[in-house]
Amino acid sequence: MSVDLKTQVRDYTKFFMGTVESIDLEEIKERPLRFGEGSVQPLASPSRRRGWLVAVAGAVTVLVVGLLTLLTRQTVPEAPIASQPSPSPTVSTPAPVPSTPIEGSASGWSRIPHDEAVFGGAGPQRMFSVTVGGPGLVAVGESDPDGSRNDLDAAVWTSVDGITWSLVPHDAAVFGGAGLQGMFDVTVGGPGLVAVGLDASDAAVWTSADGLTWSQVPHDEAIFGGAVMSGVTAAGPGLVAVGGAVWTSVDGLIWSRVPHDEAIFGGANELGMLDVTVGGPGLVSVGVADRDAAVWVATTDD
């Protein structure tokens, strides 16, 4: 409360209290009180006079207290109520929306229309492996151009986009020869691309810088004789090939044959590694052993 208001209240209180103190009790005792029209009666007794005085003093007190309360409410602002932080809105995480399969995904396969000049011939034509390389994609396999089935040749196809394909022109000095020839796997490596397979009854390797022009690695009986290469991958010293044995190469041009271990590579009847990839402890190869599936593993240092 301000000083001016306090002074006003004090003066107002003195005024009322002075009024009460200045009343002459004897005068009150003789003064008639009117209750109703034409009715005049004096105060009957001192006790009643005391009651009247108490009533007057009580009324004055109530009036002063009420005035103090009123002035206090008008001049003293209430303390502001501390604002409570608004509760953070509950944010619900939307359920994941299944992605729409993109064109070319595993759920949207289609077959490239057959082109007899590219995919056909008098005898069977087979693609065994494909990799990204050359002009875009390179696939390898075998071809029987005359339908004799006794003189299969290695074959190579290329594509820029996987839709339109071309057959690399046949070169008998590279892809043909007496007996059977075929490329079973291809990978990026060496001078550009390396393909492995079969030439007659021996392992064979072909290389290319661009997927269009190929050459065959010269035959070495101690290295390639008596076995077939069926899989190749870029790993180890540069390249690793598997089949009836295991071979390694730094550049795809010069190869070494891993020494034979009968406990690992031997067995009765049918046995061979059909493919190899980087994984596991270093390399993983899969194939067949005595008509059952088989797995071989190796570190890249082996």
Image (cartoon, helix red, strand yellow):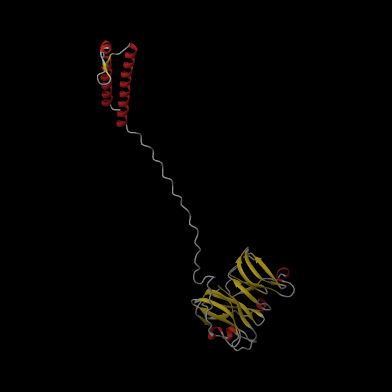
Quadrant, the N terminus: top left
Quarter of the rendering containing residue 37: top left
Q: Residue at x 62, y 82 (%)?
A: 181
Q: Position of residue 137 (x, y in %)?
A: 52, 76
Q: Position of residue 83 (x, y in %)?
A: 39, 40
Of residues 78 and 159, which is closer to you in this image? 78
Residue at the farthest top position:
26
* Above or below 153: residue 48: above
Quadrant, the C terminus: bottom right
Quarter of the rendering containing residue 182: bottom right
- Image label count: 0
Quarter of the rendering containing residue 215: bottom right
Of residues 220 and 99, which is closer to you in this image? 99
* Above or below 242: residue 201: below
Residue at the farthest front position:
38
Q: Position of residue 139 (x, y in %)?
A: 55, 77
Q: Residue at x 26, y 26 (%)?
A: 4
Q: Position of residue 174 (x, y in %)?
A: 58, 83
